[in-house]
Image (tube, coloured by chain):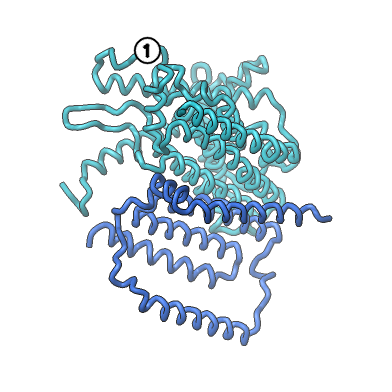
Chain colours: A blue, B cyan
Amino acid sequence: MNIIQILFWFLSVVAIFSALMVITSKNPVYSVLWLIVTFFSISGHYILLNAQFLAIVNVIVYAGAIMVLFLFVIMLMNLNKETEPQKNRWLKMAGAVAGGCLMLVFVAALKDAGLKDQEAMVNEGDIGLIKNLGKELFTTYVVPFEISSILFLSAMVGAVVIGKKE
Amino acid sequence: MILLSISLWFILEKAILIACIIGLSFFIAMYTTYAERKVAGWLQDRHGPNRAGPFGILQPLADGGKLFFKEEIIPLASNKVLFLLGPGLAMITSLVTSTVIPWGAPIVTDKGSIPLQVADVDMGILIVFSVVSVGVYGIMIGGWASNNKFSLIAAIRGASQMVSYELPMGLALIAVLFMTGSLKMSVIVDNQIHGGWGGFLSWHVWSQPLGFIIFFVCALAECNRTPFDLPEAENELNFGYHQEYSSMKLGFYLFAEYINMFVSSAVIATLFLGGYDIPFVNEASWKLEPWLMSLISFSMLMAKISFLLFVFIWIRWTIPRFRYDQLMNLGWKKLIPLALLNMIITAAVMLWLKK
């Protein structure tokens, strides 16, 4: 076992454990904090794949900005264990079945996707470095990139319009 | 000596460097509290602390000792785990940023060179940003776990302020990155030492004056310093997000603020003031011993940091606090458009110069 394998197993265990804690915690604030731990372990996986830019952006955008807003709303509304509504038992079971079906679909789809013989490039491959990523984004994929930026702009304008309404 | 394919010497070298940097951060933070009170005394025409030791030089030790021996109180209605986690997170995030800063010229020996930088990674400056963006949690978790309305309001104020001011900070940085073409801190410093305009003039503060001012203002806001210290506004919020904290936990929060100041001064010095560059001289022609050269360049960086810390303190005792809506207006309606403008002008000039 070399150090990359040790790190991989450690990060995977942390990711799965914290993801489970997100959905099993009774207190919404704990759920958000465990979700932040999940994002950090996923960033660790990105670094193992040498996708450094993706790893850092994942921390900045998801752990640093989006989760702050989540925590913000939960703290402002003062959601806690007591205010959490008790859900119907049948609803819970239906949710479990639906989630299981989704997993089944994923497994079935990925089983024959030909990913098995493509091994991940661990600690090598430089497509994840910022220089290559930027060049690729602004040459090959410039049109989809610009279209998605317009989508974000319209979403921003929409949010301002909704916020302005008295 | 190889364990798990990592050389033990490498680990030892980095461990010593990390220990030195953490010790240095604590030392500087301690004496920044002293400097803060001395400068405040000077600006207000009084003596400042002068009882402990000559000129009150032992005052920070006395303050630290006082905090250590105070009674530890954890409120009954608080959330114990998160209450303990808050100050720890604040401290960790303030210390981690210092890993990517180059503290001096590398020591070149026969067997290779030893960089005075813990990690010279490709993502250098972005790591600073990611840690800064995570730094909000120390305040938010601490404020919420105290189970006190004032603390909660302060925590939410602090978080929204930090999230808002990260944006102009990042935009101001992009203009600098246009000029260096790299996110590596060592390349950014190198670019200023061997830049096109020659010596001292190739510091980014001359080519990016607007970016420098925007970055500095945002650094003030990120450190929760006056005029942006709304999370600690005593007259509205009693004592802010650390109101329920006592003893060394309070000490951690206060201390983390000073370490943040130190590290953000170091980042500003590295990005805009040439890092460890010595102005007006060509140090390569001196032919000094490498360790002496490194020591001199390190002291130069320290001098720049001390100057910036002095400006931080100076501003605190000069300018009154903003109102909350003024703070948000400044951030979103003035700094962000200015930073965008700065970015566009920089890009246009660079394209024009290339032709």
User: In which image quadrant can residue B19 be found?
Assistant: top left
Circle 1 crowding by C-alpha within 10 Å: few under 14, some 14–19, many from 20: few
| Residue at the image position 65 percent from the left and 55 percent from the top | A72
The relative height of residue B340 versus residue A136 in the rendered view (above or below) is above
The relative height of residue B161 versus residue A31 in the rendered view (above or below) is above
The percent position of residue A44, horizontal first and vertical second, equals 39, 56
| Residue at the image position 30 percent from the left and 20 percent from the top | B293
Q: Nearer the viewer, residue B83 or A11?
A: A11
Determine whether, in the image, residue B316 is placed left or right of residue A60.
right
Q: How many marks?
A: 1
Output the chain of dot 1: B
Residue highlighted by disc 1: B281
The relative height of residue B172 versus residue B78 in the rendered view (above or below) is above
Say if residue B243 shows up in the picture.
Answer: no
The relative height of residue B65 versus residue B58 in the rendered view (above or below) is below
The percent position of residue A96, horizontal first and vertical second, equals 54, 82
Say if residue A83 shows up in the picture.
Answer: yes
The percent position of residue A58, horizontal first and vertical second, equals 48, 54
Determine whether, in the image, residue B223 is placed left or right of residue B61.
right
User: In which image quadrant can residue B328 be found?
Assistant: top right
The percent position of residue B24, horizontal first and vertical second, equals 41, 31
Determine whether, in the image, residue A132 is placed left or right of residue B138.
left
Residue lying at the far bottom in this picture: please name it. A90
Amino acid type indicated by mark 1: Val
Mark 1 lies on a secondary structure that is loop
| Residue at the image position 47 percent from the left and 41 percent from the top | B128
Q: Nearer the viewer, residue B196 or B314?
A: B196
| Residue at the image position 17 percent from the left and 49 percent from the top | B2
Q: Nearer the viewer, residue B61 or B186?
A: B186
Residue lying at the far front in this picture: please name it. B355
